[in-house]
Amino acid sequence: MSSAFARPLRLFVLLAVLAAFPTACARNPGPEPAAVTEAGFAPGRVDREQNQRTLDTLRRTPLTGRVMRVGTIEDIRLAPGEVILTFDDGPAGDNTRRILDALDDKGVKATFLMVGEMARSRPGLAREVVARGHTVGSHTHGHPNLAAMSHGRAIDEIARGERALREAGIDDVPFFRFPYLADTAALRRHLAERGIVVLDVDIDSKDYFRISPARVASQTMARLRARGSGIILFHDLHARTATMLPSFLNMLEREGYRVVALRPAREGPPTAILASSR
């Protein structure tokens, strides 16, 4: 082949490849979302200063409430019309991401009580929860009933859960929730002595039952209306919860509720003084 003919041919081939490249990328979405998230947040640990900046620059909506700094369980005092959103048992892949997106869309922050073995299997997603401005607490390592164990075994299970979160890159775990809400006075004292705040539940969404997303939202709203405020229990483990959350947040907004963001007191001074108890 002559050089005079080869040069235009090479140019033609190059232009054809470049023209086809965007189309090929569009057909090939690349790694699954989990792989993208893991790559985006690993390796490394949570940047807590960046986390605070995320909270400080939060896009405010009518649903955005105050930040509550909590050092002991007695600090959790809600005024009428205020709610705290909590999600147990994750992180759980796409369900958790959909929940994060719904919360972002409304400019509100939640507390995620993570199971250690779930965080260990999805460390990037665990860190993404914090990087997007939410608070993380522990929910033990394997979600057993601590009240059915010996005190020593229960303490070891709590420690394993905290260790798993640290191994996932989350250094500070200031909150805890008992699996099945099954506690003992001795375990509560143990956690309080270590400066860990137990998060109880005022309103149980019961999203763990096989019911429709619409029913999860409606029955949770009914319980909230009857009580007026409180800590709401959801589970990011369930697809029905991720599906119902946007409509539930819209209900909260229409009825004038505010979502309070929990933060440990040791991160800084309180941003508000509470006027009434829950």
Image (tube, rainbow, N blue to C red):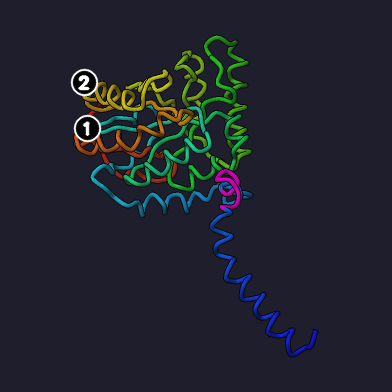
Q: Is residue 252 left or right of residue 205?
A: left
Q: Secondary structure at mark 1?
A: loop
Taking the spot 60% from the left edge, 49% from the top edge, the residue there is: 31
Q: For the point 58% across and 54% down, which residue is it? A: 28
Q: Which residue is mark 2?
A: 226
Name the outermost residue toward the right. Answer: 1
Residue marked by disc 1: 81
Quadrant where the image shows the C terminus: top left
Toward the viewer: 34 or 104? 34
Relative vertical location of residue 238 with respect to residue 27 in this rendering, above or below = above
Q: Secondary structure at mark 2?
A: helix
User: Residue 149 placed where, x, y %?
Assistant: 58, 11
Is 268 located above or below residue 81 in the figure? Answer: below
Q: Position of residue 191 (x, y in %)?
A: 50, 24
Position of residue 273 measured from the top left corner of the image (x, y, whole percent): 26, 39
Residue 207: x and y, percent? Answer: 39, 23
Nearest to viewer (mark 1 / mark 2): 2
* Residue in the picture at 38% in, 35% down: 70
Q: Amino acid at mark 1?
A: Gly
8 lies left or right of 20 = right
**Residue 111 is drawn in which quadrant?**
top left
Q: How crowded is the residue under tag 1: few (<14 C-alpha within 10 Å), some, or many (20+)?
A: some
Q: Is residue 127 above or below residue 251?
A: below
Q: Is residue 18 magenta?
A: no
Q: What amino acid type should be assigned to the residue bearing mark 2?
A: Ala
Residue shown at 59% from the left, 66% from the top: 21
> Quadrant location of residue 7?
bottom right
Q: Give the residues drawn in magenta, as a range.
A: 29-36
